[in-house]
Image (cartoon, helix red, strand yellow):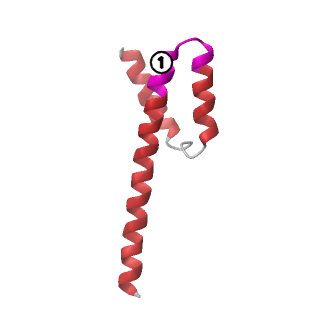
């Protein structure tokens, strides 16, 4: 269990740079499903979806913040 948690922490650190590439996500899912570890693939997919949701909310918050500043100045 600790090995999986450290693995997910390491992937979280690395995949933040590559999250915008949808090909990378499906590539990892395909590899885990080929090894016949479907439960691990489902956990990994939910982990990636959670990270994508976090990155989308951060981007939307940044956009809304900049829009407020822009419309206040004009």
Could you say whether the residue bearing mark 1 is in a helix, strand or loop?
helix
Quadrant, the N terminus: top left
- Horizontal arrangement in the rendering, residue 17 relative to residue 68 (left or right): right
Q: Which of the 4 image quarters holds residue 74?
A: bottom left
Q: Position of residue 16 (x, y in %)?
A: 49, 42
* Residue 36 within the magenta-colored segment of the rendering: yes
* Residue 40 within the magenta-colored segment of the rendering: yes
Q: Is residue 42 above or below residue 60?
A: above
**Which residue is nearer to you in this view: 5 or 31?**
31
Q: Is residue 45 above or below residue 63?
A: above
* Residue most extreme to the top: 36
Residue at 60% over, 12% down: 35
Q: Position of residue 61 (x, y in %)?
A: 37, 60
Q: Position of residue 54 (x, y in %)?
A: 40, 46
User: How many callouts does the rendering have?
Assistant: 1
Q: Is residue 48 above or below residue 44?
A: below
- Horizontal arrangement in the rendering, residue 15 relative to residue 31 (left or right): left
Q: Position of residue 2 (x, y in %)?
A: 36, 16
Residue pointed to by mark 1 = 40
Q: Main secondary structure of the magenta part?
A: helix
- Label 1 packing within 10 angstroms: few (<14), some (14-19), many (20+): some
Residue at 53% over, 43% down: 19
Magenta span covers which residues? Answer: 32-44
Q: Which of the 4 image quarters holds residue 31?
A: top right
- Horizontal arrangement in the rendering, residue 39 relative to residue 35 (left or right): left
């Amino acid at each position: 269990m600790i090995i999986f948690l450290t693995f997910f922490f390491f992937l979280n650190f690395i995949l933040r740079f590559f999250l915008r590439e949808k090909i990378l996500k499906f590539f990892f899912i395909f590899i885990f499903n080929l090894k016949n570890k479907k439960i691990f693939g489902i956990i990994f997919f939910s982990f990636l979806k959670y990270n994508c949701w976090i990155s989308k909310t951060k981007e939307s918050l940044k956009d809304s913040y900049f829009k407020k500043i822009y419309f206040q100045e004009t």
